[in-house]
Every structure is written in structure tokens, then in C-alpha cells.
Image (tube, helix red, strand yellow):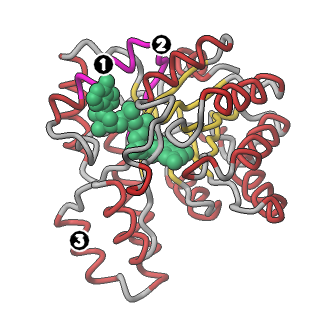
Amino acid sequence: MKIKDIIKENQAIFSCEIFPPKSYMNIDKTKAVAKAICDLNPDFVSVTYGAGGGTSKQTVEIARYINDTGNTALAHLTCASSDRQEVGAAIEKLKSYGIENILALRGDILEENKDKPRDFTYASELVTEIKRHGDFCIGAACYPEGHVECESMEQDLNNLKTKVDCGVDFLTTQMFFDNTAFYSFMFRALKKGIHVPIIAGIMPMTNSAQIVRSCKLSGATLPTRFRRIADKFGDNPEAMKQAGIAYATEQIIDLIANGVKGIHLYTMNKPDVAQQIMSNLSFIVGADRICMK
Ligand code: FAD
């Protein structure tokens, strides 16, 4: 099913993200994770695409597996490290497997490849390319606190508007830990004329190493309230996990109470964390979602 139709039919949707294994040898392990996540009955499950396209085969295989379990898959696809032919082949493969939803991304550009010529410079060009290949539902990324490379939020929003106008059906945000950053972004996006549904990306921070790494990569700000939690419980894995789950739960409740269109959980391949958050929200996102399949 196309995600844009799922969004239309529901008040607030709930989705999960998983990443594929680096090596095809470990595909069964990730399928077990995918199965456990699908058993939570989210509205869709997205599968990331390893930086540089190294996991292309695994991404497609896991997305296909998700569709086979009766869930809806969203396959991520990046373009910065691939030429037009490789990107075209990846899209055709998704089409042949019946995968209808693609998250169109540029991907990160490695320092050593910065000046190399490439077929795709921005994700907006990938959106156009996907549309050339067929009738896909296309998602794209957005950044409530601005993309790390962009000089100003204003310019980033102008670039986002260009990308959406190329044919994006919905947006998913980078992780954020302060809901006011998201509300302010929503307001500015609307003012720019961006009217596609925006799904809020939430990352439950369950260990201290992950907190440092994720914030560095994403550029997301850690509010003082969360910093205090990390300072207090960072050395105690069980306590940090519990506090991280509670913090993400509170963020989600506030977002849903304020009418957000959807929540996307960065699960980090931890079904138990996703399960606990879903149970915390059982009467909020709908009791019938938990363990229906
Ligand atoms: P773009 O939309 O192309 O934007 C990149 C930068 O270029 C921004 O600063 C933007 O303002 C600027 N820009 C855009 N258009 C123009 C223009 N016309 N002129 C000038 N500047 C412009 N990475 C992976 O490798 N694999 C994944 O699976 C993956 N999944 C992700 C999922 C989500 C929800 C998010 C938020 C990010 C994900 N990423 C993933 C990371 C993403 O690839 C990086 O953040 C990347 O640096 C930017 O990708 P983009 O698609 O947002 O790029």
C-alpha cells in the first residue's frame, strides 16, 4: 500500500525504521528483527540504505520481507555515491519486487569524494528520477534544526520547498529532542508553502555512546532536561534505557496531543525498545496495534 494513502486514512500514523546488515551473511538476523518490529503492527517499516550504497541488496531484500509479512515497506535509496545507471537499476529492482514506497535521499558525501563529478547532486534530482521510473509514493528527509551543511535555516527551507515540488508525497524529519524545534519548523514550512504531511522522527536514546554519536551526526540539539538525564544515568545501562524510553514516550505524547500527522521511531534494530514505547502508548496510538499479527 502507498504510504500517502495510509496517511490519508489515519489520524496519526506510527512507523518504525530498521537498518540492514552490512554483510548479506547476516540477513537472517535482520529478518528476525524486522519480524519482531512488524509484529508490533506499525503503519509502515522503513529500511535504511547504507552510506555509499553498500547495503543495496540487503535493503531491497529486507523491504521485500517486510511486504511479505503483510506490512508496508519503505525502502530508502541514496544517490550521491551512484551513477544514473546504478540508481535506475535499484529503482527497477524495487519495482519488480512490488515495493511502492521509496525514501529519496542524497546520502552523505565523503570528504574525499567532495570534488568528484556525480550524476546526482541533491535528493530533489533523485525524486525526479524515481518519478521517471514509475508510480511510486516518494518520501524525503527534512531537518527541523536545519541540515548540517546548510548556511541558514531559511535557505534549507527554500531547498526543501524545491525538493517537495519535484514530487515528494511526505516528509520524515531528522531526530530531534526538543519538540518546540519541531513546532517552529512546522510553522515555517507551512509559511513556505510546504503542505505535504510531515512525520516526526523520534530516536529513543538508550545508551550514552549512542547519545554522543547520534547528536554529532545529526546536528540535533540536546535540551538541558535530557542532558541532566544522560549525566545522571549515562553510566547505568538499565537506568539509561528506562529513562530514554520514558523521554521518547513523553515527546510522542506531546506531539500527538498537538496534532502531529505521524511518528517515525528510529528503532536502532531494538524491537524491545520499540515494543515498550508502543505499550506505553497503547491507548494513545490505538490498543489494537499491539501484537495483532
Ligand atoms: P538534500 O535534500 O539533497 O539536501 C542536502 C543539502 O543540500 C542540504 O543542506 C540542502 O539544504 C542542500 N540543498 C538541497 N538542494 C539544493 C539546491 N538546489 N541548491 C543548493 N543546496 C541545496 N543516509 C543514508 O546514507 N542512508 C539512509 O538510509 C538515510 N536515511 C535517512 C532518513 C531520514 C529520515 C533522514 C532525515 C536522513 C537520512 N539519511 C540517510 C541521511 C541523509 O542522507 C543526509 O542527511 C544527507 O546529508 C542529506 O540527504 P538529503 O536527502 O536530505 O539531501
Q: Quadrant of ligand 1?
A: top left
CA distance separating discs 3 and 2: 38 Å
Residue 91 position by quadrant: top right
Q: Badge 1 is on which residue?
A: 161
Q: Badge 3 is on which residue?
A: 227
Q: Mark 1 or mark 2, which has the lower sequence index?
A: 1
Q: Badge 2 is on which residue?
A: 167
Residue 272: x and y in percent read 63, 64
Q: Residues within 10 Å of mark 2 (few under 14, many from 20)?
A: some
For image coordinates 62% across by 52% down, the residue present is 18
Q: Mark 1 or mark 3, which has the lower sequence index?
A: 1
Q: Residues within 10 Å of mark 3 (few under 14, many from 20)?
A: some
Q: Closer to us: mark 1 or mark 3?
A: 1
Please state if 7 lies on the left or on the right of 71 as rendered: left
Query: Assess mark 1: CB under 8 A from ligand 1?
Result: no
| Residue 142 seen | no
| Residue 44 seen | yes
